Amino acid sequence: MTVPPGGPAAGREPAAAGPVDQPAGRAAGRPAVGPAAGRAAGSVGRAVWRCGTDPVGPAVLLGPLAVLAAVSVPVLTWVVLGGLAGYSLSGSV
Amino acid sequence: MFAAGLLLGGLLSGLVLALAGGLVTPLPLAGRQVAAVTVALLGLLREAGLVPIRLPQNSRQIGQDVLRNPVRGALQFGFELGTGVRTYVSATAPYVLAIAVLLAGSPAAAVLAGLGFGAGRAITPLLRQASAAPARWDALLTTRLRAVALVAAAAAVAALALLFALSRR
């Protein structure tokens, strides 16, 4: 099963996080892995995950893939177009 | 089981189209290919709201009684959805694909398209689950459906035109 970056509970964390370039955890020469940096990384991770699971994602991916398949591996065109057609019915049950 | 049902349903529809495709093989291949691309273009225009075409569909939802048995119900529910003919068809791409497969007259293409259709339908619940926020994803989907349908229709035009043009070289 796929789990979003930061774990399933990540979405329940407060959204407010410091700027990405905040020098958190730098005191005493430690690397920047303090709580603020961790929150910032988690926030970026969640944003990337949200973008990656956007409902339009599969269509944006499969559309060009269908064209690419038509040019390079013709037989795959039918599978990809089938996938697009099936996905276009999202929400119809 | 749900995904397996979707694939089986898509496979069945593909096999039916493969059989029906045999009826059009006496027609000239070039003419069939041009017709398929023309239909795809009409589909794109319809999806863009430029050409009003009413398409046939089974205006019903699959009854919840199929889910009484969790395992068998998931398989049956997936199968019925996978066929693409047991419930609403809210986009043009499935029609375009069915007609293109029919006119291509290739059993392999029909089976592959059917399996792809089932797999494509399976993406929705998988992606929804992976989003970790299904309610938010559902809300987002309603705002993205038109874009998804447009991309699918445009890809069908481009891919079919290229596929057929290159096959004649």
Image (cartoon, rainbow, N blue to C red):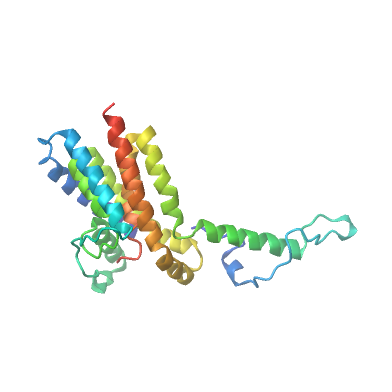
The residue shown at (40%, 38%) is A68
- The image position of residue B83, as x and y in percent, is 23, 56
Question: Is residue B93 in view?
Answer: no
Quarter location, residue B163: top left
The residue lying furthest to the right in this view is A28
Quarter location, residue B124: bottom left
The residue shown at (73%, 60%) is A20
Left/right of residue A19 with respect to residue B41 in the rendered view: right
- The image position of residue B88, as x and y in percent, is 25, 65
Left/right of residue B26 with respect to residue B169 in the rendered view: left
Q: How many marks?
A: 0
The residue lying furthest to the front in this view is B50
Quarter location, residue B121: bottom left
Instruction: Name the residue nearer the viewer: B72 or B121.
Output: B121
Left/right of residue A13 with respect to residue A83 in the rendered view: right
- The image position of residue B133, as x and y in percent, is 50, 68
- The image position of residue B152, as x and y in percent, is 35, 52
Quadrant occupied by the C terminus of chain B = top left
Left/right of residue B18 with respect to residue B3 in the rendered view: left
Instruction: Name the residue nearer the viewer: A69 or B73.
Output: A69
The residue shown at (37%, 34%) is A71
Quadrant occupied by the N terminus of chain B = bottom left
Question: Is residue A18 in view?
Answer: yes
Instruction: Name the residue nearer the viewer: B135 or B151.
Output: B151
